[in-house]
Image: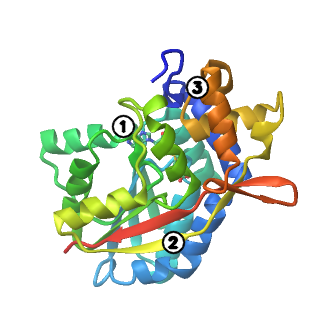
Amino acid sequence: MESAMRSLLSDNSRYVESFRVFLKNSTEHQCMQQFIETKLPEVISSIGNEKSTLDVLGIGSGSGEIDLQMLSKIQAKYPGILINNNIVEPSAEQIFCYKERVAKTPDLDNITFSWHKKTSTEYEHQVNEQKEYRKYDFIHMIQMLYYVKDVPATLKFFRSCLSPNGKLLIILVSGESGWSTLWKKYGPRLPLNDLCLYITAGDITDMLRSMGAQYKSYDLPSDMDITGCFIEGDRNGELLLDFLTETCDFKKNAPSDLRDQIMKDLQSPECSTTKDGKIIFNNNLSVVVVGNE
Ligand SMILES: C[S@@+](CC[C@H](N)C(=O)[O-])C[C@H]1O[C@@H](n2cnc3c(N)ncnc32)[C@H](O)[C@@H]1O
Protein backbone atom coordinates (compact mmCIF):
# COMPACT_ATOMS: atom_id res chain seq x y z
CA MET A 1 0.00 0.00 0.00
CA GLU A 2 1.25 3.50 -0.85
CA SER A 3 2.28 5.31 2.32
CA ALA A 4 0.51 8.70 1.90
CA MET A 5 -2.88 7.00 1.77
CA ARG A 6 -4.87 6.26 4.90
CA SER A 7 -8.16 4.53 5.43
CA LEU A 8 -11.31 6.64 5.14
CA LEU A 9 -12.52 5.09 8.39
CA SER A 10 -9.69 6.80 10.25
CA ASP A 11 -11.57 10.09 9.72
CA ASN A 12 -15.10 9.42 10.97
CA SER A 13 -16.66 12.70 9.92
CA ARG A 14 -15.30 12.41 6.36
CA TYR A 15 -16.49 8.79 6.30
CA VAL A 16 -20.01 9.81 7.35
CA GLU A 17 -20.03 12.65 4.78
CA SER A 18 -18.84 10.31 1.99
CA PHE A 19 -21.43 7.73 2.96
CA ARG A 20 -24.20 10.35 2.72
CA VAL A 21 -23.05 11.37 -0.77
CA PHE A 22 -22.93 7.70 -1.73
CA LEU A 23 -26.54 7.21 -0.53
CA LYS A 24 -27.64 10.30 -2.48
CA ASN A 25 -25.98 9.16 -5.70
CA SER A 26 -26.95 5.50 -5.56
CA THR A 27 -30.07 3.35 -5.41
CA GLU A 28 -28.54 1.59 -2.38
CA HIS A 29 -31.37 2.26 0.06
CA GLN A 30 -34.10 2.13 -2.59
CA CYS A 31 -33.16 -1.43 -3.56
CA MET A 32 -33.06 -2.41 0.12
CA GLN A 33 -36.50 -0.81 0.58
CA GLN A 34 -37.83 -2.88 -2.29
CA PHE A 35 -36.41 -6.01 -0.69
CA ILE A 36 -38.04 -5.04 2.62
CA GLU A 37 -41.40 -4.54 0.88
CA THR A 38 -41.38 -7.68 -1.20
CA LYS A 39 -39.16 -10.28 0.47
CA LEU A 40 -38.70 -9.42 4.15
CA PRO A 41 -42.21 -10.59 5.17
CA GLU A 42 -41.30 -14.10 3.99
CA VAL A 43 -37.90 -13.94 5.80
CA ILE A 44 -39.51 -13.00 9.12
CA SER A 45 -42.57 -15.22 8.71
CA SER A 46 -41.69 -17.51 11.62
CA ILE A 47 -39.40 -15.44 13.89
CA GLY A 48 -42.30 -14.44 16.17
CA ASN A 49 -44.11 -17.77 16.43
CA GLU A 50 -45.84 -17.98 19.83
CA LYS A 51 -43.95 -14.97 21.21
CA SER A 52 -45.18 -11.84 22.98
CA THR A 53 -41.80 -10.08 22.69
CA LEU A 54 -39.28 -10.04 19.86
CA ASP A 55 -35.59 -9.34 20.39
CA VAL A 56 -33.90 -7.62 17.46
CA LEU A 57 -30.19 -6.79 17.13
CA GLY A 58 -28.77 -4.41 14.53
CA ILE A 59 -25.00 -4.43 14.00
CA GLY A 60 -23.51 -1.36 12.30
CA SER A 61 -26.95 0.22 11.87
CA GLY A 62 -25.69 3.69 10.95
CA SER A 63 -28.44 6.27 11.31
CA GLY A 64 -31.17 3.62 11.39
CA GLU A 65 -33.04 4.44 8.17
CA ILE A 66 -33.19 0.81 7.03
CA ASP A 67 -33.63 -0.48 10.61
CA LEU A 68 -36.85 1.49 11.08
CA GLN A 69 -38.26 0.22 7.81
CA MET A 70 -37.56 -3.37 8.81
CA LEU A 71 -39.09 -2.77 12.25
CA SER A 72 -42.21 -1.43 10.60
CA LYS A 73 -42.53 -4.67 8.58
CA ILE A 74 -42.04 -6.72 11.76
CA GLN A 75 -44.80 -4.67 13.44
CA ALA A 76 -47.07 -5.28 10.44
CA LYS A 77 -46.42 -9.02 10.55
CA TYR A 78 -46.87 -9.28 14.36
CA PRO A 79 -49.38 -6.55 15.31
CA GLY A 80 -49.11 -5.43 18.94
CA ILE A 81 -45.98 -7.47 19.70
CA LEU A 82 -43.35 -5.82 21.91
CA ILE A 83 -39.98 -5.36 20.21
CA ASN A 84 -36.71 -4.87 22.07
CA ASN A 85 -34.46 -3.29 19.48
CA ASN A 86 -30.74 -3.32 20.30
CA ILE A 87 -28.18 -1.48 18.22
CA VAL A 88 -24.43 -2.06 18.19
CA GLU A 89 -22.85 0.91 16.44
CA PRO A 90 -19.40 2.40 17.16
CA SER A 91 -20.00 5.87 15.69
CA ALA A 92 -21.37 8.47 18.15
CA GLU A 93 -22.42 10.64 15.19
CA GLN A 94 -24.49 7.83 13.66
CA ILE A 95 -26.10 7.00 17.01
CA PHE A 96 -27.04 10.66 17.42
CA CYS A 97 -28.73 10.66 13.97
CA TYR A 98 -30.49 7.36 14.75
CA LYS A 99 -31.91 8.84 17.98
CA GLU A 100 -33.09 11.94 16.10
CA ARG A 101 -34.78 9.72 13.53
CA VAL A 102 -36.54 7.72 16.24
CA ALA A 103 -37.74 10.94 17.88
CA LYS A 104 -39.32 12.05 14.56
CA THR A 105 -40.90 8.71 13.60
CA PRO A 106 -44.52 7.97 14.57
CA ASP A 107 -45.88 4.52 15.53
CA LEU A 108 -42.87 3.20 17.42
CA ASP A 109 -44.90 2.78 20.63
CA ASN A 110 -44.28 -0.92 21.13
CA ILE A 111 -40.55 -0.70 20.44
CA THR A 112 -37.78 -0.04 22.97
CA PHE A 113 -34.38 1.11 21.70
CA SER A 114 -31.02 0.36 23.37
CA TRP A 115 -27.89 1.70 21.74
CA HIS A 116 -24.48 0.19 22.48
CA LYS A 117 -21.64 2.41 21.30
CA LYS A 118 -19.36 -0.47 20.36
CA THR A 119 -17.91 -2.43 17.50
CA SER A 120 -19.29 -5.92 16.94
CA THR A 121 -16.10 -7.42 18.40
CA GLU A 122 -16.32 -5.24 21.52
CA TYR A 123 -19.94 -6.34 21.92
CA GLU A 124 -18.93 -10.00 21.54
CA HIS A 125 -16.23 -9.56 24.22
CA GLN A 126 -18.72 -7.90 26.55
CA VAL A 127 -21.20 -10.77 26.14
CA ASN A 128 -18.49 -13.34 26.85
CA GLU A 129 -17.11 -11.44 29.84
CA GLN A 130 -20.51 -10.88 31.42
CA LYS A 131 -21.73 -14.33 30.34
CA GLU A 132 -25.02 -12.76 29.28
CA TYR A 133 -25.86 -15.02 26.39
CA ARG A 134 -29.05 -13.36 25.18
CA LYS A 135 -30.86 -14.83 22.18
CA TYR A 136 -32.25 -12.74 19.33
CA ASP A 137 -35.08 -13.43 16.92
CA PHE A 138 -33.71 -11.21 14.18
CA ILE A 139 -30.13 -10.00 13.74
CA HIS A 140 -29.03 -7.85 10.83
CA MET A 141 -25.65 -6.72 9.54
CA ILE A 142 -26.18 -4.37 6.64
CA GLN A 143 -23.13 -3.20 4.72
CA MET A 144 -20.88 -3.53 7.76
CA LEU A 145 -18.92 -6.80 7.63
CA TYR A 146 -16.16 -5.00 5.69
CA TYR A 147 -15.14 -3.43 8.99
CA VAL A 148 -14.80 -6.60 11.03
CA LYS A 149 -11.38 -8.18 11.45
CA ASP A 150 -12.35 -11.84 11.81
CA VAL A 151 -15.46 -12.37 9.69
CA PRO A 152 -15.83 -16.19 10.15
CA ALA A 153 -15.58 -15.79 13.96
CA THR A 154 -18.13 -12.95 13.85
CA LEU A 155 -20.55 -15.04 11.79
CA LYS A 156 -20.12 -17.96 14.17
CA PHE A 157 -20.70 -15.78 17.25
CA PHE A 158 -23.82 -14.03 15.95
CA ARG A 159 -25.31 -17.28 14.66
CA SER A 160 -24.92 -18.59 18.20
CA CYS A 161 -27.01 -15.60 19.38
CA LEU A 162 -30.04 -16.66 17.30
CA SER A 163 -33.14 -17.99 19.03
CA PRO A 164 -34.56 -21.29 17.63
CA ASN A 165 -36.60 -19.61 14.86
CA GLY A 166 -34.21 -16.67 14.55
CA LYS A 167 -32.77 -15.25 11.31
CA LEU A 168 -29.52 -13.46 10.59
CA LEU A 169 -29.73 -11.11 7.61
CA ILE A 170 -26.54 -9.89 5.95
CA ILE A 171 -26.26 -7.40 3.08
CA LEU A 172 -22.98 -6.81 1.24
CA VAL A 173 -21.94 -5.88 -2.28
CA SER A 174 -22.35 -8.69 -4.75
CA GLY A 175 -19.36 -10.62 -6.08
CA GLU A 176 -20.50 -9.46 -9.55
CA SER A 177 -20.51 -5.73 -8.72
CA GLY A 178 -18.11 -3.01 -9.83
CA TRP A 179 -16.83 -3.01 -6.24
CA SER A 180 -15.64 -6.57 -6.59
CA THR A 181 -13.78 -5.72 -9.83
CA LEU A 182 -12.16 -2.70 -8.21
CA TRP A 183 -11.16 -4.48 -5.02
CA LYS A 184 -9.76 -7.57 -6.75
CA LYS A 185 -7.54 -5.42 -8.92
CA TYR A 186 -6.57 -2.64 -6.53
CA GLY A 187 -7.20 -3.99 -3.01
CA PRO A 188 -3.48 -4.60 -2.32
CA ARG A 189 -2.62 -1.01 -3.29
CA LEU A 190 -5.40 0.61 -1.24
CA PRO A 191 -5.41 1.15 2.54
CA LEU A 192 -6.49 -2.37 3.36
CA ASN A 193 -5.71 -2.47 7.05
CA ASP A 194 -7.18 -3.41 10.38
CA LEU A 195 -10.18 -1.24 9.59
CA CYS A 196 -11.43 -2.52 6.28
CA LEU A 197 -11.68 -5.77 4.35
CA TYR A 198 -12.62 -6.01 0.71
CA ILE A 199 -15.17 -8.79 1.04
CA THR A 200 -18.29 -9.49 -0.95
CA ALA A 201 -21.43 -11.55 -0.39
CA GLY A 202 -19.75 -14.35 -2.40
CA ASP A 203 -17.04 -14.60 0.30
CA ILE A 204 -19.74 -14.81 2.99
CA THR A 205 -21.61 -17.66 1.29
CA ASP A 206 -18.27 -19.53 0.89
CA MET A 207 -17.68 -19.14 4.64
CA LEU A 208 -21.22 -20.22 5.50
CA ARG A 209 -20.93 -23.31 3.30
CA SER A 210 -17.68 -24.30 4.98
CA MET A 211 -19.39 -23.93 8.38
CA GLY A 212 -22.24 -26.13 7.16
CA ALA A 213 -24.76 -23.30 7.67
CA GLN A 214 -28.01 -23.16 5.69
CA TYR A 215 -28.63 -19.87 3.91
CA LYS A 216 -30.69 -18.26 1.16
CA SER A 217 -29.40 -15.49 -1.14
CA TYR A 218 -31.26 -12.70 -2.95
CA ASP A 219 -29.80 -10.37 -5.61
CA LEU A 220 -30.47 -6.63 -5.33
CA PRO A 221 -29.65 -4.78 -8.55
CA SER A 222 -28.39 -1.27 -7.74
CA ASP A 223 -26.43 1.50 -9.41
CA MET A 224 -24.53 4.66 -8.53
CA ASP A 225 -23.99 7.80 -10.56
CA ILE A 226 -20.23 8.48 -10.38
CA THR A 227 -20.13 11.18 -13.10
CA GLY A 228 -19.04 13.75 -10.47
CA CYS A 229 -15.81 11.78 -9.84
CA PHE A 230 -14.65 12.93 -13.28
CA ILE A 231 -15.49 16.62 -12.86
CA GLU A 232 -12.51 18.68 -11.70
CA GLY A 233 -13.12 20.33 -8.32
CA ASP A 234 -16.48 18.55 -7.72
CA ARG A 235 -16.46 18.01 -3.94
CA ASN A 236 -19.17 15.33 -3.95
CA GLY A 237 -17.24 13.53 -6.70
CA GLU A 238 -14.14 13.59 -4.48
CA LEU A 239 -16.09 12.21 -1.52
CA LEU A 240 -17.54 9.46 -3.70
CA LEU A 241 -14.07 8.56 -4.87
CA ASP A 242 -12.99 8.32 -1.23
CA PHE A 243 -15.90 6.00 -0.56
CA LEU A 244 -15.11 3.85 -3.61
CA THR A 245 -11.48 3.43 -2.61
CA GLU A 246 -12.02 3.57 1.19
CA THR A 247 -9.22 6.14 1.14
CA CYS A 248 -9.14 9.54 2.83
CA ASP A 249 -8.86 12.28 0.17
CA PHE A 250 -7.91 9.78 -2.53
CA LYS A 251 -7.56 12.37 -5.32
CA LYS A 252 -4.97 14.31 -3.35
CA ASN A 253 -3.12 11.46 -1.65
CA ALA A 254 -3.00 8.63 -4.21
CA PRO A 255 0.11 8.32 -6.37
CA SER A 256 -0.72 9.63 -9.84
CA ASP A 257 -0.26 6.28 -11.64
CA LEU A 258 -2.72 4.54 -9.28
CA ARG A 259 -5.18 7.45 -9.49
CA ASP A 260 -5.08 7.45 -13.30
CA GLN A 261 -5.56 3.68 -13.53
CA ILE A 262 -8.48 3.66 -11.11
CA MET A 263 -10.14 6.62 -12.84
CA LYS A 264 -9.83 4.74 -16.13
CA ASP A 265 -11.09 1.43 -14.75
CA LEU A 266 -14.04 3.09 -13.03
CA GLN A 267 -15.33 3.87 -16.53
CA SER A 268 -14.63 0.39 -17.92
CA PRO A 269 -17.51 -2.05 -18.65
CA GLU A 270 -16.37 -4.25 -15.73
CA CYS A 271 -17.33 -1.41 -13.37
CA SER A 272 -19.75 0.95 -15.11
CA THR A 273 -22.03 1.68 -18.04
CA THR A 274 -22.77 5.03 -19.68
CA LYS A 275 -26.40 6.19 -19.72
CA ASP A 276 -27.57 9.59 -21.02
CA GLY A 277 -24.03 10.95 -20.68
CA LYS A 278 -23.78 9.75 -17.08
CA ILE A 279 -21.33 7.17 -15.76
CA ILE A 280 -23.26 4.57 -13.80
CA PHE A 281 -21.30 2.27 -11.50
CA ASN A 282 -22.53 -1.29 -10.84
CA ASN A 283 -23.49 -1.21 -7.14
CA ASN A 284 -25.30 -4.59 -7.11
CA LEU A 285 -25.84 -6.04 -3.64
CA SER A 286 -26.78 -9.43 -2.25
CA VAL A 287 -28.82 -10.33 0.77
CA VAL A 288 -27.85 -13.51 2.60
CA VAL A 289 -30.31 -14.90 5.14
CA VAL A 290 -29.03 -17.47 7.61
CA GLY A 291 -31.26 -19.57 9.86
CA ASN A 292 -30.45 -21.27 13.13
CA GLU A 293 -29.88 -24.73 11.63
C1 LIG B 1 -21.77 1.57 5.33
S1 LIG B 1 -22.42 1.97 6.89
C2 LIG B 1 -23.96 1.10 6.86
C3 LIG B 1 -25.00 1.70 7.74
C4 LIG B 1 -26.38 1.05 7.65
N1 LIG B 1 -26.36 -0.33 8.03
C5 LIG B 1 -26.94 1.22 6.26
O1 LIG B 1 -26.86 0.29 5.46
O2 LIG B 1 -27.44 2.31 5.96
C6 LIG B 1 -21.45 0.98 7.97
C7 LIG B 1 -21.76 1.16 9.44
O3 LIG B 1 -20.99 0.22 10.20
C8 LIG B 1 -20.46 0.85 11.33
N2 LIG B 1 -19.27 0.10 11.73
C9 LIG B 1 -17.99 0.29 11.34
N3 LIG B 1 -17.19 -0.62 11.94
C10 LIG B 1 -17.99 -1.41 12.70
C11 LIG B 1 -17.75 -2.52 13.56
N4 LIG B 1 -16.52 -3.02 13.71
N5 LIG B 1 -18.78 -3.06 14.23
C12 LIG B 1 -20.04 -2.57 14.06
N6 LIG B 1 -20.33 -1.52 13.24
C13 LIG B 1 -19.32 -0.95 12.58
C14 LIG B 1 -20.17 2.27 10.85
O4 LIG B 1 -20.06 3.19 11.92
C15 LIG B 1 -21.37 2.54 9.96
O5 LIG B 1 -22.45 3.09 10.68
Q: Residue furthest top?
A: 4
Q: Amino acid at mark 3?
A: Cys
Which of the labelled discs sits on residue 118, or is there none?
Answer: 1
Q: Quadrant of the C terminus?
A: bottom left
Q: Dot 3, crowdedness within 10 Å: few (<14), some or many (≥20)?
A: many
Q: Nearer the viewer, mark 1 or mark 3?
A: 3
Q: Dot 1, crowdedness within 10 Å: few (<14), some or many (≥20)?
A: some
Identify the secondary structure beneath mark 1.
loop
Ligand 1 contact, mark 3 (Cβ < 8 Å): no
Q: Which residue is mark 2?
A: 219
Residue shown at 41%/75% (left/top)? Answer: 81
Q: Nearer the viewer, residue 162 or 10?
A: 10
Residue shown at 21%/39% (left/top)? Answer: 126
Answer yes or no: is residue 175 visible: yes
Residue shown at 71%/48% (left/top)? Answer: 267
Q: Which residue is mark 3?
A: 248
Residue 108 x %, y %? 54, 64
